C-alpha cells in the first residue's frame, strides 16, 4: 500500500481529490458546485498551463527555466504591436511571435549546452534581458488600441478579430478557446515525450547526462530542443495573454515562472530530471487552479494564497525525496 501511495500519478490524484473535498466543504454557498466556477478556473489557469508545458520538458531534461514569464511578456508586446499597431495579417503576427519565443529559448539552451553554464544562471540572464527587450520595444508603455501620433495625440484603432477569437468562449460559452489551446499544447507535449525519439532523448539526458552522452545521444542538441520548445510555448502563452487583456503589457508574466514550476512539481515531475510526464503536469494545473479558485470564492487574501502555495511546493518536493 505504501508503494502505491508513492506512485506520482496516485499521489497527484489523491492530492486533487483532497483539494476537491476541501472545495466541497468550503463551497461558498454552493458556488463551488457551479460549472461556471470551474469554467472560469480553467480559463484563468490556461496561460500558466501552457507555460507549464514547456517547463515540464525542461525539468525532465534536468534543467529549469526562470525566463518563461519574461519571454511571455515580450511576446505579448510583439504580438500586440504586429496585430494592433502594424495591422499585419494574423498568420504573420502569430508566426513572427512564435519565432521570437523559439529564438529566446534556443539562445538559453545554446548557452547552457555550449558553455556549460548552470540553467539557473543562464535563464536568469534571459529573464532580465527579455523583460528589458519588452520595455524597449514598447517604450515602457502598454501596446493597446490607443495609437500615439507624432503630434502627441492619440488615435484609437479597432481590436483585431484574432483577439476576439482567442479570447472567446465556445460550446454555448462553456469552454474558453484558451483552455482548448492549453489542452492541445499538452497533447502535443505528451506525444513528443512518449512517442518520439526526441522525447526519449529528453528523458535520457535528464536521467543521466553522462550515460546519455556515452550512448551517443546528442546531449547539447537535446537541451537546445527542450529550451527552444519551452520558448515556443512561452510565445503561445504570450499570444493568449495579449488576446485576453486586449493589449501587450511589457510587465505581463511577472512571477509566472513560479506558478509554472509549482504546477509541474505539485503534479509529481521530479526536479532531479529524468522522470515525469505532461499528464502529471495537467493534474498539477488542476490542483493549483482549484485551490486558487476555492481560496478566491471564499475571499481569502492574495498574501495568504501565496504563502499557502509556497508551503505546498515545499511539501511536494519533500514527498519526492523518498522516490
Image (cartoon, rainbow, N blue to C red):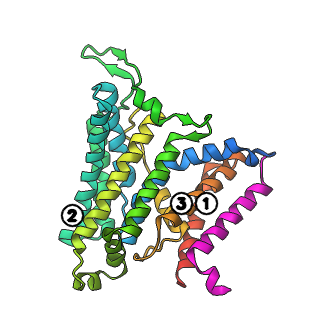
Residue 257 position, x and y percent, is: 43, 56
How far apart, in angstroms, are the residues tagged by discs 2 and 1?
33 Å
Viewer-side residue, 11 vs 65: 11
Q: State the extent of the magenta-drawn residues as a range.
A: 1-28
> Residue drawn at (74%, 48%), measured in percent from left and top?
32
Residue at the spot of label 1: 287
> Residue drawn at (26%, 38%), measured in percent from left and top?
136
Residue 103 position, x and y percent, is: 24, 52
Q: Secondary structure at mark 2?
A: helix
Of marks 2 and 1, which one's residue comes earlier in the chain?
A: 2
How far apart, in angstroms, are the residues tagged by discs 2 and 3?
28 Å
Callout in the foreground (2, 3): 3
> Residue drawn at (68%, 52%), measured in percent from left and top?
295
Snapshot quadrant of residue 206 = bottom left
> Residue 267 — which label?
none
Q: Secondary structure at mark 3?
A: helix
Residue at the spot of label 2: 110
> Residue 282 — which label?
3
Q: Is residue 275 left or right of residue 115?
A: right
Q: Secondary structure at mark 1?
A: helix
Viewer-side residue, 60 vs 183: 183
Residue 248 position, x and y percent, is: 38, 35
Amino acid at each position: 500500500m505504501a508503494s502505491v501511495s508513492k506512485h506520482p500519478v496516485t499521489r497527484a490524484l489523491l492530492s486533487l481529490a483532497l483539494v476537491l473535498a476541501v472545495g466541497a466543504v468550503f463551497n461558498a454557498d454552493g458556488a463551488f458546485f457551479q460549472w461556471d466556477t470551474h469554467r472560469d478556473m480553467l480559463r484563468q489557469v490556461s496561460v500558466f498551463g501552457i507555460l507549464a508545458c514547456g517547463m515540464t520538458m525542461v525539468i525532465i531534461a534536468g534543467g529549469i527555466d526562470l525566463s518563461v514569464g519574461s519571454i511571455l511578456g515580450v511576446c505579448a508586446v510583439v504580438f500586440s504591436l504586429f496585430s494592433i499597431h502594424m495591422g499585419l495579417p494574423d498568420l504573420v503576427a502569430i508566426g513572427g511571435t512564435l519565432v521570437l519565443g523559439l529564438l529566446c529559448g534556443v539562445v538559453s539552451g545554446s548557452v547552457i549546452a555550449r558553455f556549460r553554464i548552470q540553467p539557473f544562471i543562464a535563464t536568469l540572464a534571459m529573464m532580465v534581458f527579455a523583460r528589458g527587450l519588452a520595455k524597449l520595444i514598447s517604450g515602457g508603455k502598454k501596446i493597446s488600441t490607443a495609437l500615439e501620433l507624432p503630434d502627441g495625440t492619440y488615435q484609437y484603432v479597432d481590436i483585431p478579430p484574432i483577439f476576439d477569437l482567442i479570447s472567446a468562449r465556445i460550446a454555448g460559452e462553456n469552454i474558453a478557446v484558451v483552455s482548448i489551446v492549453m489542452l492541445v499544447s499538452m497533447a502535443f507535449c505528451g506525444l513528443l515525450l512518449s512517442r518520439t525519439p526526441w522525447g526519449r532523448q529528453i528523458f535520457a539526458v535528464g536521467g543521466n547526462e553522462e550515460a546519455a552522452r556515452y550512448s551517443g545521444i546528442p546531449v547539447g542538441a537535446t537541451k537546445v530542443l527542450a529550451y527552444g520548445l519551452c520558448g515556443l510555448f512561452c510565445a503561445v502563452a504570450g499570444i493568449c495573454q495579449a488576446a485576453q487583456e486586449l493589449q501587450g503589457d511589457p510587465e505581463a508574466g511577472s512571477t509566472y515562472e513560479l506558478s509554472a514550476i509549482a504546477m509541474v512539481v505539485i503534479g509529481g515531475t521530479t526536479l532531479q530530471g529524468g522522470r515525469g510526464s505532461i499528464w502529471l503536469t495537467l493534474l498539477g494545473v488542476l490542483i493549483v487552479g482549484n485551490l486558487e479558485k476555492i481560496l478566491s470564492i471564499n475571499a481569502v487574501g492574495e498574501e495568504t494564497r501565496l504563502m499557502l502555495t509556497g508551503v505546498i511546493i515545499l511539501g511536494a518536493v519533500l514527498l519526492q525525496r523518498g522516490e
